[in-house]
Amino acid sequence: MASRSGRALGLTPQQWIRLRRTVQNAALVLFVALFVWSRRGGWPAGVVNFTMRLDPLGMLANALASRKLLAGSALALCTVLLTVAFGRAWCGWLCPLGTLIDRFSLRRWRRRRQPYPDSWRSVKYGLLLTILSAAVFGNLTLMVLDPLTLLFRTLTASVWPALDHLVTSAQITLFRVPALHSALSTFDRLVRPKILPPDPAYYRYTWLYAAVFVAILSLNLLAERFWCRYLCPLGALMGLLSKVGIVRREVNERCTQCDACARSCPTGTIEAENGYASDPKECTLCLECWRVCPQEAIDFSRHLSLAKQREYDPGRRQALLALGTAVAGIGLFGSDVAASRDHPRLIRPPGARENNLLSKCIRCAECSRACPTSALQPAILESGLEGLWTPVVVPRIGYCDYSCNACGQVCPVQAIPPLSLEEKRQQVIGRAYIDTNRCIPWVDLEPCIVCEEMCPVPDKAVELEEVEVENGEGEVITLQRPHVIRDRCIGCGICEYKCPVNGEAAIRVYVPGT
Amino acid sequence: MHTAGLFCSLQSSLVDLQPVTARRKQTISIGDKLKSNISRREFLRRLAALGLGTVASSWLLNACGIEQRPEPTYVEPTRSPWVPTAVPSATPAPTTVSSATAAPTPTPGLEYPHIAVARGGEPEQLVRRAIAALGGMERFVRSGDDVIVKPNICAGYHTYEYATTSNPWVVAELVRLCLAAGARRVRVMDSPFGSGPEQAYAVSGIQEQVLAAGGEMEIMSRFKFVATDIPEGLSLRQKEIYQDILTADLVINVPIAKHHNLGRLTLGMKNLMGVITDRPQMHAQLGQRLADLTSRIRPALTVVDAVRILLRHGPTGGSLDDVKQLDTVIASPDIVAADSYAATLFGIDPTALGFVRAGTAMGLGRSDLDNLTIEEIAVGQ
């Protein structure tokens, strides 16, 4: 690739670096744009979820765990081919999380210290092997560590809700100035419908996702691209593929051992002890070394051989350890009470079945983003640690909209089946129960029919019974009291969402069943 | 002790700082030469100034805001096209007609019916004929007016055939009439309780027809619901009301006539619940509170869409068996009268409806249909 004139394909190293940064930024913008328009009413579902289908780790783990190959996952082969051709170029050029880690490199605050032992690099292989071993047993819990799902989830459940809150607060404040009314109206007419929800979107534990994300960025304080070097399981998978990568970095005889490349390498894979050679499994093709080299001693040329074995490469022992960890984890999850008895409020999205959701869901939160009412929340402990951050309907936060089937359409792995609206309306995701200890017409002896009014089922799953009761003042009044007709209820939860009783609703949706 | 120590450390740090700032200055100038970017320090300084400015101005705005709140005393709308009459039982004679309709209209001598009912035709025709019978849209719209049409778009579950949302052609024809009468702009809006506005606007079919007619669909902004006093309110004294509904030159209320379990029917007064927040609060004394809300909003024209009415399982519906096609449109400047007439379509005595009783008692309009002039128009013939 690099010629002796210091140029490659007509571009100087400086221009190449600029190109790489542009590509990085564009990929990040595209990722965020696809995120933003994953909301129902945005771009077509088959388009917005393509970032997840590009993820070879997600697709491979899903195929292993669900024992089914999805046609849509063929897209991941593009990434595989890219990696076979250019090594971990994905990490240096495309990965949106990698780009953010680069932009928040925290270089100024990083202390110079001894490089961490190379053996740390094997941690990511350990994670990868554990994910894949667990996937063979049908478990996908550790997919929460996939960089794409992690970033998407953070955007869904932290960044966007916070942004919306800040924008709305600013609008409410500014609306007090009459001169700004038209500007604010214009914003709400033209901008908000495209990027922010008309009603506030709330998520549970928004800080938690932000904290995980900030923690990953903060690892930059220890070493540049700490996450990519030592932890990222997708990076590990790509590292393994890079072992046969074709375009690799080479050091030629002009090298004067000036150490400039080693100091510039963001993944720290250029080492003096190895004659300033690098490991293709760690090199992200960022080209920084090429730019800083005063001797033009670095080439990126084609090879058709296996990369040199390193001591941190995963071996049989590590594979066994990962397998053991996976087996132990399966054992523990399987003996967790969550596995034997459903959490009473474990309401899954329409069409999803508990037993196969856990072995299909890659925890990407696409469905949460698509859900127009924010009813779909990443589960915390409803289905045990095993089901961490899988989608669960929380009716008090949002209801499953009767006119919506977005989650199944957008799911990249069909963990939520793609149902037509007609089919989706038949799905019983839960059942509503009235708490007569809290319900207004039962306890306060005052009229309220909100649950009946809201019930979207054509023949109403909530019926009202007219009763004559004596109120506190001794008057006999006529009241309508709600009852749930169980066979009609589909568990959409709008009754619970709209119930005007403060705090816990007086009508609540629980898992379906007797 | 402490202050002394602090002072010492401050002094020493100042001494320490000096060479640093000197060095910084140099680098800044070099940086300036290389690329004309502002230095980080300067950037931070400006950011801090901006932040302080924002905080200060928002604080100031807060202070101003208290004065800008809606005035506590109710000011009679200067442009109300009708004047509420006294309690109907006290004035049974048809002579009250003039006081109810003709008082503020610019064309004296002409008398319009209280209620115009058009039957048997296409929705657009029904609207045109009913409005024409009331004196044409020019009676309500002045050139350059900012008009809001408020249909019932309760949810995005079903198309208009299911009679859960106002008929798209009825709404669109009103938009067209307003624009033809010289309205500057006509906005159509509601805040659906289900599906969200984008979905509901689209599924109802209203969006398509309104845009074709030259109107705008507005998604109600959260910040425009402002706590507003209701001076005439008996049960409801304050409510968050959508500001534009109060400031628009003309509000046309376009409910669809539907079954509703608490109010028995949802008609014009109930339709106004779409412009407030915290709606369940209304349910406690629904009839009175709807009348209270109406007293503050006072739409100048109510057009009840009874092209298709929903007989059961309202307000959400979902079964065509519950729908009855009547091909009827009821228009009146008197919201109570329009609701009263619409009730008869369901075979319900208007005085059996809590909100009609409350509205009548508050003098918001009349429900004594026998004493009102009602122009019935058979469009089909």
Image (cartoon, rainbow, N blue to C red):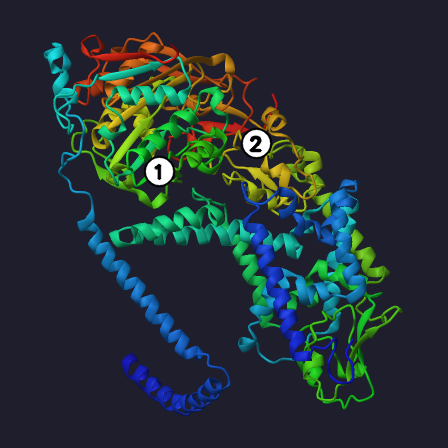
Disc 2 marks a residue whose amino acid type is: Pro
- Which label is found at residue A344? 2
Disc 2 secondary structure class: loop
Label 1, on which residue? B187
At a point 17% along the width and 22% down the height, the residue shown is: B101
- Res B47 quadrant in image: bottom left
Residue B123, percent across and down? 40, 21
Measured along the vertical axis of the image, is residue A103 above or below residue A163? below
Picture quadrant where residue B242 is located: top left
Q: Secondary structure at mark 1?
A: strand
Residue A219 rendering spot, x and y as whole percentages: 60, 67
Residue B313 position (above or below residue A397): above
Q: Chain of mark 2?
A: A
- Tell me if I can see residue A15 in this picture: yes
Q: Nearer the viewer, mark 1 or mark 2?
A: 1
Q: Mark 1 packing: few (<14 Cα in 10 Å), some, or many (20+)? A: many
Amino acid type of the residue that numbered disc 1 sits on in the rendered structure: Arg
- The residues tagged by marks 1 and 2 sit, at their Cα atoms, a distance apart of 46 Å
Contact between labelled residues 2 and 1, with CB atoms less than 8 Å apart: no
Instruction: Locate residue A121 relative to residue A453 in the image: left or right.
Output: right
Quarter occupied by the C terminus of chain B: top left
Counting other residues with Cα less than 10 Å from the Cα at mark 2, is it few (<14), some (14-19), or many (20 or more)?
few
Q: Report the front residue among A274 and A283.
A: A283
